[in-house]
Image: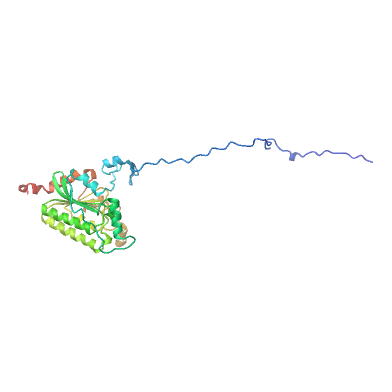
Amino acid sequence: MMSTTSFSKKPLALESTEPAVTPPPPTGNTTFAKKPKLGKSKKREIPEGLWTKCPKCSTMVFDKELDENLKVCTHCQYHFPVGAPERIHSLVETCTFEEVDADITSVDVLSFTGAASYTSQLDKYRKSTGLKDAVITGIGKIGEHRVAMGVMDFSFLGGSMGSVVGEKLTRLIEAATEKGLPIIIISTSGGARMYEGMFSLMQMAKTCGALAYHAKARLPYLSVLTDPTTAGVMASYASVGDLIIAEPGAMIGFAGPRVIKDTTQSELPPGFQTAEFLLDHGLIDSIVPRKEMKSRLIEYLNFLTAGQKYPSAA
């Protein structure tokens, strides 16, 4: 009888584990240091009323520097919109401007209703702008010249010309004709005021009729066009001045580019509604930067009133 032989089981080489790949044996301390969380970086907030971004060159301009430069960008000379009170302050001599017809206000003659009523719109803009309508009229001095001046403000319903705007300008022109004064009207407008329908369109004829009597008296009228001056205002008193002056880059025209293109069925030249284009094609007489406006107006008035000052030289 053969004796039983016992064999020990030998592990195969394939089953052996390599020390380099074998994970470390578990220990009691298995915690890892946590990675610190990165906090959200806070944006630096620029206080309001200190800096203004130029829409043309995207430069941040210090507001105090902008005000000292009459709201003209110091880098690209872009002319920011200016309200009527600020513009009057920059042109007339100190404490010489006397406003006239300041209490005339618009009324809702047609009982206009739509997305918002005319009355609610008037109340809204009177509170936000501090103005009673889109134009300020009065008599003041520019240099040595006493002039009648009307200054429009685009911030009030887009400078639209309603019955009050037309009436105030007409009364100003008639007073200037009676007193023998030159007239300066600084325009900025989107056109006639739709809330008043035909009543607003009638102001085009009324203002031009008053200017015709003023011209018959051989008195000068200077029309200053600022950005933008369009539609009914441009088609009436803004375009009949003895001298028509514009600020650099001002948009000037009657209808918008899309309407003109669809009507004429033709391609429009680039920049055809800018002051520079219109100067090249003879519609306006001069482009005057805002900082030079007062001195140039004085020069023009000196020239246009020379015959009145010295009748023998006429």
Q: Is residue 309 left or right of residue 283?
A: left
Question: What residue is shown at x 30% (from left), y 51% (from top)?
Answer: 128
x, y (%) of residue 4? 90, 40
Which quadrant holds residue 49?
top left
Left or right of 17 on screen, residue 74: left
Q: Residue at x 15, y 58 (%)?
A: 210
Quadrant assignment, res 201: bottom left
The residue closer to the viewer here, 255 or 187, is 187
- The quadrant of the image that shows the N terminus is top right
Residue at 11% across, 52% down: 179
Q: Please report the residue visible at 16 percent of the width from the left and 59 percent of the height from the top.
A: 209
Residue 272 visible in the shown view: no
Q: Is residue 151 left or right of residue 176?
A: right
Q: Quadrant of residue 204?
A: bottom left
Q: Residue furthest left?
A: 312
Q: Residue 156, image x and y in percent?
A: 27, 53
Q: Is residue 304 visible?
A: yes
The residue lying toward the viewer, choosing from 243 and 186, is 186
Q: Is residue 194 above or below residue 89?
A: below
- Of residues 208 and 7, the one nearer the viewer is 208
For residue 8, above or below residue 222? above
Residue 52 image point, x, y percent? 33, 43
The reply, left or right, for residue 183 in relation to residue 111 is left
